[in-house]
């Protein structure tokens, strides 16, 4: 069997193993549904919650299923500013996914590069880089992100930058450990015996064997990034009030809970919980599929 024929069979075997657990199917379906709804938010949302011209303060604090002054039914109610909650949650989920994916990919790229350099150069450079990683990991994640956002200000790009700063060390330490194990294997010694360049060995031979572990860590860090963004927005250091995310929506409805207007906080909170749980379940199942020894 040729190598090209083996790859599809391996992919099919991986997909069969991954989807063999019902919880993985449910989590994947939920994640795809939320992602699709978030991507299509400008076309399927009844209202643009970021366009102040389309928001009427007369429609504020409407209960789910109540008609507005214009005769439109807000099926999930409105918040204190008159924003349609369904539309706000669609756009908020879009921001959460954007922040989680963007910060995860950038941190993965930078952390992988640092980890590979530390593993293959060794010596004082490895020691220096790992001490920087240890220093980074010694600080509470939320504290570092809070300080950075106080300095940088609000905005999606600022949040992504802050999350990259607090996440890259996890990738660097993980990749370094895997690269050290891979660097001691026979295929690396054979590649060195053939006088292949260090960069070629690093990126064409070692890096592909690190990808499974990196993928699992990236999935877990994505869930953490979504949760951290919501926490920062809840504390008022994420996005501006004119661009509400799920965390900011929860914060906006916090003061209304005792007055019975539960939908402003509870509904976006449920969406955030379901999104994070689906990503975590997918990450756990991915880890179990890529490491069969965990199932024994």
Image (spheres, rainbow, N blue to C red):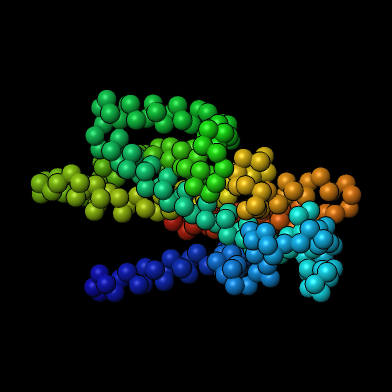
**Residue 136 against residue 225 in the figure, above or below:** above
Q: Nearer the viewer, residue 129 or 18?
A: 129
> Residue 140 placed where, x, y %?
56, 31
Q: Give the quarter of the image for residue 85.
A: bottom right
144 displayed left or right of 210: right
263 displayed left or right of 271: right
Q: Can residue 68 be seen in this view?
A: yes
Residue at point 65%, 64% (across, down) = 48
For the N terminus, the image quarter is bottom left
Residue at point 64%, 61% (across, down) = 51
Q: Which of 183 and 266 is in front in this view?
A: 266
253 displayed left or right of 105: right
> Residue 283 placed where, x, y %?
52, 54
**Residue 205 against residue 14 in the figure, above or below:** above
Residue at point 46%, 68% (across, down) = 15
> Residue 240 placed where, x, y %?
62, 47
Q: Nearer the viewer, residue 133 or 258?
A: 258
């Amino acid at each position: 069997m040729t190598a090209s024929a083996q790859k599809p069979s391996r992919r099919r075997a991986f997909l069969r193993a991954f989807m063999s657990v019902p919880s993985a199917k449910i989590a994947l379906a939920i994640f795809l549904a939320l992602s699709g709804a978030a991507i299509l938010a400008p076309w399927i949302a009844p209202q643009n919650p970021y366009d102040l011209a389309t928001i009427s303060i007369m429609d504020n604090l409407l209960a789910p299923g109540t008609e507005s002054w214009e005769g439109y039914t807000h099926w999930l109610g409105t918040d204190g500013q008159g924003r349609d909650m369904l539309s706000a949650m669609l756009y908020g989920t879009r921001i959460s996914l954007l922040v989680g994916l963007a910060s995860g990919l950038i941190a993965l790229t930078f952390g992988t590069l640092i980890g590979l350099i530390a593993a293959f150069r060794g010596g004082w450079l490895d020691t220096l880089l790992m001490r920087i990683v240890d220093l980074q990991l010694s600080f509470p994640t939320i504290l570092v992100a809070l300080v950075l956002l106080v300095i940088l200000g609000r905005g999606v790009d600022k949040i992504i930058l802050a999350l990259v700063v607090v996440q890259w060390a996890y990738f660097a330490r993980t990749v370094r450990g895997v690269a050290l194990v891979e660097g001691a294997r026979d295929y690396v010694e054979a590649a060195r015996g053939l006088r292949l360049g260090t960069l070629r060995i690093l990126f064409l031979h070692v890096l592909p064997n690190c990808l499974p572990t990196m993928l699992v860590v990236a999935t877990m860090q994505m869930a953490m990034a979504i949760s951290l963004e919501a926490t920062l927005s809840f504390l008022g250091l994420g996005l501006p009030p004119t661009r509400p995310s799920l965390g900011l929506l929860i914060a906006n409805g916090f003061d209304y809970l005792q007055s019975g207007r539960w939908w402003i906080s509870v509904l976006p909170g449920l969406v955030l919980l379901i999104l994070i749980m689906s990503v975590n379940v997918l990450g756990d199942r991915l880890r179990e599929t890529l490491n069969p020894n965990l199932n024994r």
